[in-house]
Image (spheres, rainbow, N blue to C red):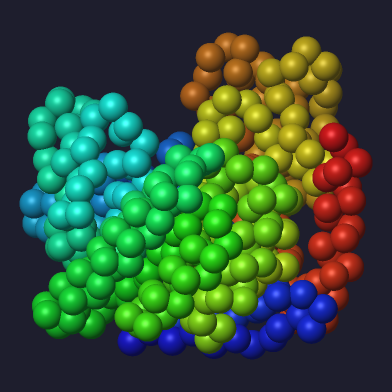
């Protein structure tokens, strides 16, 4: 039911244009996936998500397990029916959210014991439970449960996390096989902090287990951009070439462009929605804060080249006024623009790969972003 096809590759870089075929539609890669943590992409309706060009969105196992609970979503017929999104959905395993609860969790080889950030209740998340929850959610792509470490990490700490990640991935795959799961792809997650040998080894061991796709986890958690790119260079060589590759939690425009140049097919990040709620907007010349006084009399759109609803219908001065007045529409318009900006950026990158001009596209976009800083 799942197939990944590479249609075109850039001979000068690792950039690829492909298609990831799922039962609920074809995802054209490279792709940016909006994050719908709690069965909603914040401030956006599902028709609006289609309007900005989203082909696939994310849900989160940890949050949906705690609220509203898998029983509710199961009775609703799964996550697609529950949130009225008939297109592909990828669910995170909950590993990163548990990692974020540093004061509320205890990790062992069995899994992670944690207290809910909502009511303090105690839970034990195991690879098998993560798989069971994701299967009830009915996502098209499920992620293996993994251990993410905070950077900088010692070699020993990272090694322990790699061993757990590989062992947990094997347990996830066994659950997937034992329960005859057919309508859900399963992706493994490569860890290894900033240690190149550990990253390569983790990728190799995951490939031996065999997954439908592979993710690079544990980045965008404190490393420099150069350290991220060096790690992606290793992953570009180490991960199976014919499978989709997913860089988790990365959403800065320059990171997307450089990630694509290193063979990444899929991206996600909360940045466009979080920034939108705070009035921070992406533009081709870098980020702007719409709340700044200099936009009070600026009657131009956020981005003259953007085709989103906000840019076609409203001015910076108007959106600034909405923020100053505390109007909800301000966050909605800025979120709408930010999502469209990143989705459009990646779609343009895909077109440039198909037209054999990705190096030129990469150079021009990066040069403009760097000039603005």
- For the N terminus, the image quarter is bottom left
Residue 77 visible? The answer is no
Q: Is residue 112 left or right of residue 49?
A: left
Q: Is residue 90 left or right of residue 113?
A: right
Query: In this picture, is 327 found above or below 366?
Result: above
Q: Which quadrant holds residue 102?
A: top left
Residue 182 visible? The answer is yes
Q: Is residue 21 left or right of residue 106?
A: right
What residue sits 68% from the left and 59% below the top?
Answer: 230
Query: In this picture, is 29 found above or below 287?
Result: below
Where residue 42 sits in the image (x, y, percent)? 43, 39
Where residue 280 sits in the image (x, y, percent)? 65, 30
Query: In this picture, is 302 found above or below 197?
Result: above
- For the C terminus, the image quarter is top right
What residue sits 23% from the left and 82% below the top?
Answer: 182
Q: Is residue 101 left or right of residue 325?
A: left
Q: Count of labels shown? A: 0
Q: Residue furthest front?
A: 156
Where residue 301 sits in the image (x, y, percent)? 78, 36
Q: Which quadrant holds residue 281?
A: top right
What residue sits 9% from the left and 56% below the top?
Answer: 75
What residue sits 64% from the left and 53% below the top?
Answer: 228
Query: In this picture, is 41 found above or below 289?
Result: below
Where residue 138 sits in the image (x, y, percent)? 23, 66
* Front one among 253 and 344: 253
């Amino acid at each position: 039911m799942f197939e990944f096809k590479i249609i075109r590759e850039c001979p000068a870089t690792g950039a690829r244009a492909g298609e990831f075929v799922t039962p609920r539609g074809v995802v054209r890669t490279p792709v940016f996936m909006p994050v719908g943590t709690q069965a909603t992409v914040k401030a956006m309706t599902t028709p609006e998500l289609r309007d900005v060009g989203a082909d696939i969105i994310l849900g989160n196992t940890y949050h949906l397990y705690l609220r509203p609970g898998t029983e509710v979503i199961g009775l609703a017929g799964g996550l697609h029916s529950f949130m009225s999104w008939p297109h592909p959905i990828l669910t995170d395993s909950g590993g990163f959210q548990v990692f974020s609860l540093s004061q509320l969790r205890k990790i062992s080889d069995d899994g992670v014991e944690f207290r809910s950030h909502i009511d303090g209740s105690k839970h034990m998340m195991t690879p098998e439970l993560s798989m069971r929850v994701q299967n009830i959610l009915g996502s098209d792509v499920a992620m293996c449960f993994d251990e993410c470490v905070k950077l900088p990490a010692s070699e020993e700490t990272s090694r322990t996390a790699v061993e757990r990640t590989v062992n947990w991935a094997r347990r996830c795959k066994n659950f997937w096989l034992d329960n005859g799961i057919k309508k859900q792809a399963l992706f493994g997650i490569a860890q290894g902090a900033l240690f190149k040998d550990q990253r390569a080894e983790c990728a190799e061991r995951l490939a031996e287990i065999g997954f439908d796709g592979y993710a690079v986890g544990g980045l965008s958690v404190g490393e420099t951009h150069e350290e991220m790119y060096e790690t992606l260079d290793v992953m570009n060589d180490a991960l199976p070439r014919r499978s989709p590759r997913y860089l988790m939690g990365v959403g800065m425009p320059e990171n997307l462009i450089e990630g694509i140049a290193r063979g990444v097919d899929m991206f996600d990040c909360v940045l466009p929605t979080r920034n939108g709620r705070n009035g921070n907007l992406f533009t081709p010349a870098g980020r702007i804060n719409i709340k700044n006084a200099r936009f009070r009399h600026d009657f131009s759109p956020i981005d003259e080249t953007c085709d989103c609803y906000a840019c076609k219908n409203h001015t910076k001065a108007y959106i600034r006024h909405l923020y100053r007045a505390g109007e909800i529409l301000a966050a909605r318009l800025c979120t709408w623009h930010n999502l469209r900006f990143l989705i459009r950026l990646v779609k343009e990158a895909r077109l440039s790969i198909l037209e054999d001009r990705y190096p030129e596209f990469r150079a021009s976009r990066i040069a403009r972003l760097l000039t603005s800083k």
